[in-house]
Image: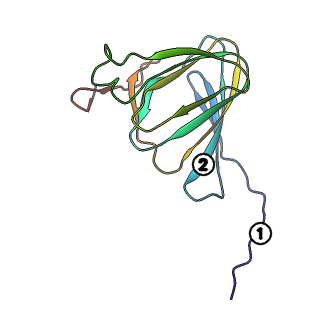
Amino acid sequence: MKHVKTSWISKAGNKVEMPWGHEISWTSMSPGTNGKTIFMSAGNRSSLKFNRLKNESLLLLSGEAIAEFGNELYTTDPILNPLKVQKMFPGSVLNVQSGCPYRISAITDCDLIEIGDSGKSEAVRIDDDYGRDIENKEAGEEK
């Protein structure tokens, strides 16, 4: 018997407070994909981090932000592989492949949507303004 496709409404996850604002996760019906709505308060920024396995795209819906981003070689040789810095405006999308570092800094209050591979986060913090654990990028150990 043929499986009948359908449509439905589901509920987003709970609001999670972060040092820079908050986020609400939601699951997509597409296999392997999930999303988040993210609010960042003006003057705050995310960790400088990379995801070991997860690819993601971040769409700036409102506000102005600065994106710092680089290639996967940044963690082993930041001198030869420096981060790029670019201003983001509503409609800008930062596409980040696994292993590539990035950070978002909110110039004004910002609303973003993040779409990424589900179940594959394994985020590695390189730098953090809020005292959260960071990983020693050379030894692969947490500080």
Q: Position of residue 116 (x, y in %)?
A: 56, 44
Q: Residue at x 65, y 53 (%)?
A: 28
Q: Is residue 90 left or right of residue 135?
A: right
Q: Quadrant of the C terminus?
A: top left
- Tell me which amino acid carries mark 2: Asn
Three-letter code for the amino acid on which mark 1 is drawn = Thr
107 over 136 or under it: above or below: above
Give the residue at the far front of this rendering.
80
| Residue 6 tag number | 1
Using the rendered view, name the quadrant where residue 32 is placed: bottom right
Q: Residue 34 carries which label?
A: 2
The front one of 73 and 20 is 73
Depicted 63 relative to depicted 61: above or below: above
Residue 108 horizontal side relative to residue 7, left or right: left
The percent coordinates of residue 60 (x first, y second) are 68, 27
**Type of colouring:** rainbow
Q: What element carries label 2?
A: strand
Determine whether label 1 and label 2 are within 8 Å by CB.
Answer: no
Sequence-first tag of 1 and 2: 1
User: Label 1's element?
Assistant: loop
> Which class describes the residues within 10 Å of circle 2: few (<14), some (14-19), or many (20+)?
some
State left or right for residue 82 relative to residue 62: left
Residue 133: mark in rendering:
none
Q: Quadrant of the N terminus?
A: bottom right
Q: In this view, does 102 lie above or below 28?
A: above
Q: Which residue is situated farthest in the bottom direction here?
A: 1
Q: Residue 36, percent across and down? A: 63, 40
Q: How would you rate the neighbour count of disc 1 (Cα within 10 Å): few for under 14, some for 14-19, many for 20 or more?
A: few
Q: Which residue is drawn at 73% across and 23% down?
A: 90
- Which residue is at the front of the view, 28 or 91? 91
Which one is in front, 91 or 124?
A: 91
Q: How far apart in space, not on screen, are marks 1 and 2 (Cα)? A: 19 Å
